[in-house]
Image (tube, rainbow, N blue to C red):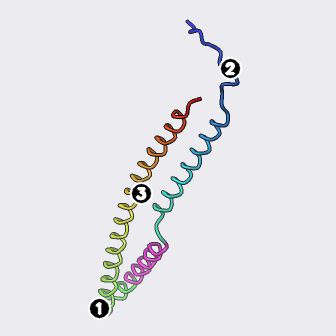
Amino acid sequence: MVVPHTPIPISSIRTNDIILLLTLGCITETLRRFLLFRVKVPSSASKAQRQSLTQLRMETIKMRNIGPSKFVETSKLERKILTLEKDLKDGEESRKQNVKSTEQLLKRLGIVVNFVIFLMYYGIPL
């Protein structure tokens, strides 16, 4: 069963409006993705801390293999490792919280932008 449709005249399709809406959508989505990318990627300081943590762990293993004569140096390195791990964990927690708040903010801004576009598009009489 086919439902009859009235033909849509080509002159009633507003291509400028379609292009405007597509452009606004592309711009807002690109900005949203860029901001989320910037927030989610770990900082260079965090990467450097991770690299130094790996280096300290390797040094600690070497000191342990030497034997009990290097006990004091080994324990100092282990304490440095613990403090670095704590700092990295705290930084990761704050970064996760920052990502979560940024996602919520971008979600709210997206809703506001959609509402403004709806009001502007349908609020202006043809």
User: In this picture, which residue range is highlighted in magenta?
Assistant: 44-61
Q: Residue at x 31, y 88 (%)?
A: 76
Identify the residue position indicated by label 1 in the image.
Answer: 72
Identify the residue position indicated by label 2 in the image.
Answer: 9
Q: Are marks 2 and 3 in contact (CB under 8 Å)?
A: no
Q: Residue at x 37, y 70 (%)?
A: 91
- Pick the front one: 115 or 61: 115
Quarter of the image where the C terminus is located: top right
Residue 21 to residue 14: above or below: below
Outermost residue toward the top in this view: 1
Q: Are marks 1 and 2 in contact (CB under 8 Å)?
A: no
Residue 110, horizontal then vertical, whole percent: 46, 46
Residue 95 to residue 86: above or below: above
Foreground: disc 3 or disc 1: 3
Identify the residue position indicated by label 3 in the image.
Answer: 102
Residue 74, horizontal then vertical, whole percent: 32, 87
Q: CA distance from mark 1 to mark 2?
A: 87 Å
Residue 20, horizontal then vertical, whole percent: 62, 41
Q: Residue at x 44, y 44 (%)?
A: 111
On whether residue 53 falls in the magenta region, the answer is yes
Q: Are marks 3 and 1 in contact (CB under 8 Å)?
A: no
Relative to 16, 24 lies left or right: left
- What is the chief secondary structure element of the magenta stretch? helix
Residue 28, horizontal then vertical, whole percent: 54, 49
